Amino acid sequence: MVRFLFFALLLFTVQGLKAQNQVYENKVFKSNLKTVQCYNSQKEQSFPIINLKSNETITFAFDDLDGGQKNYSYTIEHCTYDWKSSRLNTMDYLETFKEDIIFNYKYSFNTLVKFTNYRLTLPNDQIKPKIAGNYILKVYENNKPENVVITQRFYISNNTVNVGAEVVPSTDVANRNTKQKVNFTIFHQIPIANPNSDIKAVVMQNNIPYSKIVNTKPLYIRQGSLVYDELNANEFWGSNEFRKFDTRSFRYNAEHVADIYRDSIQNVILSTDLANKSSRYSNQFDENGNFFIRNTDGRDNITDSDYAAVYFTLSATPPTAGGTAYIVGAFNNYALTNENKLTYDEAKGRFHGKIKLKQGLYDFKYIWLDENNKINETAFEGSFFETENNYQVLVYHRRPGSRFDDLIGFANINNVKNAK
């Protein structure tokens, strides 16, 4: 009996360590997989959240530049508010099977770079969640769950509370022209035993993972409402409007494109960017970091849009003695990887880099990761209170005795216009 308990404890420990080693963030593990998209199917590139037991779905897609047809499967796992495994049994959060094969795929047509596009929608007849919360989608190859190639976050809300939010200038006089502060109130009619321990509220800017701020305690607890407007809380750099470029066609130089030439693949040289050193805000339209796969050279955006090597150049000096510059946007999940890293040419005083991207419209920005691994998003872009940004507020509730964080409310607001 003692021996049995020992091995049971050992197995539980090993499983726990495996769960800790899992990746619960947006990540692509293979270089041949590109253009990962995940959004509410009602609006392309919208925040990937749906209401529980509704007709809404999540659209997920990616390209495999190896071409041909591969055996990709997927599963989903429930997570805590801070993106760790909830360690629930699949029967606790799924009312269907726990895995399925991606059957929906299309081959590229008339492109120099051959690829296969894979696509699925959630929930579906094979995988249907039955509780709200954070979920991680895991795509794996050859029926081997341990061979994960993509992980992608999405959200399911109960929508049992309402969230009212506003964006105001920073309360710090020194930052009033450069920072934006999010105040919000949770309006509820459900019993909340202890708001200081049972409620977590996460605020993000433009769905950028590293921007998130976690609120653990409301400033005021009132009958039917929880108020979060503490001084100096939930403040974000306004940053600047995203830079952008247009590669919908390789037949002419569109916005921010300096040159296009063709060898084994298409090559796009973007106009040289400058660091923003202006003290005044300049308004320009952007998509808050998003990208849209489009082409005017073919008939189908998914299969006829080709890939190109896109060359970026930033004329600027390093902000600090040590550190690295990166190109980020929704197209790479704002990931700080070698592919998105810029190389500095000291002789020319320029950063440069190359990324393989599919035809379309892209927002991007330059950020600096200093020698202490601290992200500086204003070093090359500047920061202004007037900058138009989307903010997401997610409210989680862990009921007394419950084993998971329930996503009970969501708000997507814009400091200039009404966001959807």
Image: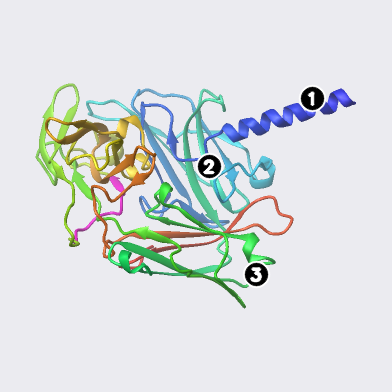
Q: Residue at x 29, y 25 (%)?
A: 114
Kindly indicate whether the residue at mark 1 contacts the one at mark 3 (C-beta within 8 angstroms).
no
Query: Mark 3 or mark 1, which is nearer to you?
Result: 1
**x, y percent for residue 25:** 48, 40
Q: CA distance from mark 2 to mark 1?
A: 30 Å
Q: Which residue is mark 1?
A: 7
Q: Mark 2 or mark 1, which is nearer to you?
A: 1
Dot 3: within a 10 Å radius of its alpha carbon, few (fewer than 14), some, or many (20 or more) residues? few
Q: Earlier in the sequence, mark 2 or mark 3?
A: 2
- Residue 76's disc number: none
Q: Check whether the beta carbons of the residues at disc 2 and disc 3 lie within 8 A of each other.
A: no
Give the camera-side residue of 206 and 296. Answer: 206
- Give the image location of residue 68, x and y in percent: 37, 22
Residue 197 drawn at (x, y percent): 64, 60
Label 2 sits on a secondary structure element that is: strand
Q: Which mark is residue 136?
A: 2
Residue 311 appears anywhere in the view: no
| Secondary element at image label 3 | loop
Q: Which residues are magenta?
A: 283-292
